[in-house]
């Protein structure tokens, strides 16, 4: 066995091998200024290539930017959470909960061509959520950083409200958040089929060929013969300007928690197609708290859950929430 040395700070560190019984002593170096500290280079991550978007994708980006500007001009996409101009009672809160949490916005095998509310049992997560955030090749790097931070912060908020542990991870994820441009989505079918093999052909075609007026969407699957989520996939258009992407994050991730429907009577709420509110409101936070209240159970029918929801709504608002 030999003895080896290691250079550090321009000096020799003597290596001693007891098995070989050998050592070297090197002469002192000539005096001089100390050399800079040398640290090992950090691993270089693989380069990320951003593919330029097609003309169709660029046209969509212009369309959605104009749409966002139009909505803002009308005073819509509010982010204030509601205020004195949007009061609601416990009766309204309970009624909105039943409509939003106990109905589906679309048929399970639909193509998103038109909303069709159908009665549902109470559905929610009963196991920790492992959320991953993925981007198509056409999404700019700065936009990826912004959206990943937005999803992470919002996931923490959803976790606090629901009590469901949510972590951002690529390790066996069960809640997938995709930001895809028009070109990226055309290559999404194989991955989506891997995540949700049971997805109907109509729903698959709708997701791949998403209509222009469908801003974002979330789909979920459930445990066999149960009403507990096993996988969810949220799809958000990368062509959206920043506020519309954030609005999609807020609505689709909250819907993926179990608030699956919209109601024209819900206010202040993002679960209303009038686009008045773009970000989760105080009203919506209460809906999420109600959904995960332990007095409700997965699989409850509306007739069973409704009176419990009314009691919870009265209790919450009497405690000062609004």
Image (cartoon, rainbow, N blue to C red):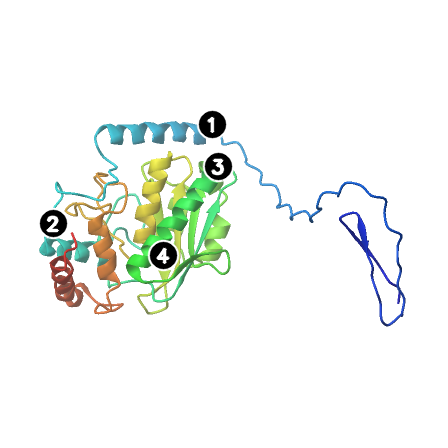
| Residue identifier under label 1 | 55
In the rendered view, does 6 fall on the left or right side of 304? right
Q: Is residue 48 above or below residue 172?
A: above
Q: Are marks 2 and 1 in contact (CB under 8 Å)?
A: no
Work out which residue is located at the far bottom of the displayed protein and give it. 19
Q: Are marks 3 and 4 in contact (CB under 8 Å)?
A: no
| Alpha-carbon span between mark 3 and mark 2 | 39 Å
Image x and y of residue 293, in percent: 23, 65
Of the numbered discs 4 and 1, the one sitting upstream in the chain is 1
Image x and y of residue 3, in percent: 87, 62
Q: Residues within 10 Å of mark 3 (few under 14, many from 20)?
A: few
| Residue identifier under label 4 | 220
| Residue identifier under label 3 | 142
Q: Between label 2 and label 4, give the one nearer the viewer.
A: 2
| Alpha-carbon span between mark 3 and mark 1 | 21 Å
> SS for tag 3?
helix
In the rendered view, does 107 fall on the left or right side of 309? right
Image x and y of residue 98, in percent: 17, 58
> SS for tag 2?
loop
Question: Residue visible at 48% across and 40% down?
Answer: 184
Question: Residue visible at 49% across and 42% down?
Answer: 136
| Alpha-carbon span between mark 3 and mark 4 | 29 Å
């Amino acid at each position: 066995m030999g003895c080896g040395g290691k250079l550090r700070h321009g000096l020799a560190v003597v290596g001693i091998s007891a098995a070989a019984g050998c050592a070297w002593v090197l002469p002192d170096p000539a005096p001089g200024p100390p050399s800079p500290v040398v640290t090992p280079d950090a691993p270089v991550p693989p380069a990320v290539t951003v593919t330029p978007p097609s003309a169709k994708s660029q046209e969509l980006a212009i369309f959605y930017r104009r749409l966002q500007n139009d909505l803002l001009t009308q005073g819509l996409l509010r982010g204030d959470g509601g205020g004195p101009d949007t009061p609601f009672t416990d009766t309204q809160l309970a009624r909105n909960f039943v409509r939003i949490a106990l109905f589906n916005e679309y048929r399970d095998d639909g193509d998103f061509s038109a909303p069709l509310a159908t009665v549902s049992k109470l559905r929610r997560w009963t196991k920790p959520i492992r959320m991953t955030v993925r981007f198509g090749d056409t999404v700019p790097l700065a936009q990826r950083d912004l959206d990943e931070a937005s999803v992470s912060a919002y996931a923490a908020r959803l976790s606090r409200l629901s009590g469901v542990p949510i972590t951002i991870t690529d390790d066996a994820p069960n809640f997938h958040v995709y930001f895809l441009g028009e070109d990226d989505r055309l290559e999404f079918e194989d991955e989506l089929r891997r995540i949700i093999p049971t997805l109907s052909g109509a729903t698959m075609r709708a997701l791949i060929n998403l209509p222009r007026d469908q801003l974002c969407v979330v789909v979920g699957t459930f445990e066999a013969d149960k009403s507990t989520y096993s996988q969810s996939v949220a799809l958000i258009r990368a062509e959206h300007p920043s506020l519309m992407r954030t609005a999609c994050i807020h609505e689709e991730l909250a819907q993926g928690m179990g608030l699956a429907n919209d109601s024209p009577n819900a206010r202040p709420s993002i679960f209303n197609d009038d686009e008045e509110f773009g970000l989760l409101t105080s009203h919506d936070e209460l809906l999420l708290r109600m959904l995960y209240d332990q007095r409700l159970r997965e699989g409850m029918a509306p007739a069973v859950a409704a009176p419990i929801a009314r009691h919870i709504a009265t209790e919450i608002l009497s405690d000062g929430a609004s």
